[in-house]
Amino acid sequence: MARRQLLVTLVLLTGACTAEPAAPPPSTTSPMKPPTLINEVVPPQNVLTVVRDVIDGRTVELADGSRVRVSQLAPPAPCWAEASLMFARTTLLARSVRFTGLAPGEVTMELEDGTDYAVLAVTQGAMRPEGVDGGPLINAEAEASAAKRGLWGPPCNGSATSTAAPAPAPTTTTPQSPPPPPPAPTTTTSPAARAACAVSYKITGQWQGGFQAYVTVRNTGTAPVNGWTLRWNFTRGESVREMWNATARQSGATVNAVNADYNPKIEPGASVEIGYNGGAYGPHSAPTAFTLNGTQCSAG
């Protein structure tokens, strides 16, 4: 009898143990967890970096050492290569830029304030567009050409061919006639006293820390001016960085622009144009008073 009771007890215990596995079925709902989301990393379309070197008017070296070329800009014209290099250095060197559309070494480039570098360079006459039939670059080229700005003025006069290089060469022969300039001081002192002049000052571009301006000096008198110095004063701490068609000599706020070897003479009714890049701590305002060889000039 005791053995039968023990047997019954064991059967009941065994049934209880085998009944436990029935519990897992409800747990089959646990795998129903939400799927893990994979965040895809999208390559940036705009990259902000620093230009650490400028090779020419359209080619720069970036902070990571890569060398890129700004698209849709023609090679610098030989007659304006040095001036376009100075423009690019003033505008881009050690500046933050944003480039897009990085192809094999070719980009479109914006300054930190959003200015398109290619459009700015063409507008200022530092470069010409290439491979475009319309749009902002063609409009910029038309503006520069109409204003005779940069390579649209002397010595290039709009020529983009390699034959433009000899253009300055003839002018290097005229410097052989600097002997005339020595007598010039004597000629300039008396004509300068009675010579009349008019000056037009145009700010053609401004960017963070710099600007570009063109100054046109017209002889409104009846005698030629042979050998000239144009003087003006800055009012906000500006400085001349590079100047073409004249030599800049700055002392404090006073700037003296002295004629180049190839343009010492201004005939009655004729004019010369000076262009330069300047540095500024804020917006640049045009000077209001100019003297030519010590004589006050009128506006215009």
Image (cartoon, rainbow, N blue to C red):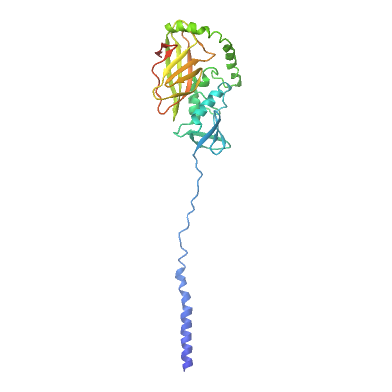
Image coordinates of residue 161 in percent, x first then y, are 59, 21
Residue drawn at the location 47% of the way across and 79% of the way down:
17
> Do we see residue 128 in this rendering?
no
Residue drawn at the location 49% of the way across and 15% of the way down:
258
Is residue 244 or residue 145 the one in the foreground?
244
Whether residue 99 is situated above or below residue 81 in the rendered picture: below
User: Farthest bottom residue?
Assistant: 1
Q: Total of numbered circles in the picture?
A: 0
Whether residue 8 is situated above or below residue 41 in the rendered picture: below
Image coordinates of residue 208 in percent, x first then y, are 44, 30
Image coordinates of residue 51 in percent, x first then y, are 52, 34
Whether residue 38 is situated above or below residue 184 in the rendered picture: below
Residue 192 occupies which quadrant of the picture?
top left
Q: Quadrant of the C terminus?
A: top left
Lateral position of residue 231 relative to residue 132, left or right: left
Residue drawn at the location 46% of the way across and 90% of the way down:
5
> Do we see residue 175 in this rendering?
yes
Image coordinates of residue 200 in percent, x first then y, are 42, 16
Lateral position of residue 222 relative to residue 83, left or right: left
Whether residue 268 is situated above or below residue 237 in the rendered picture: above
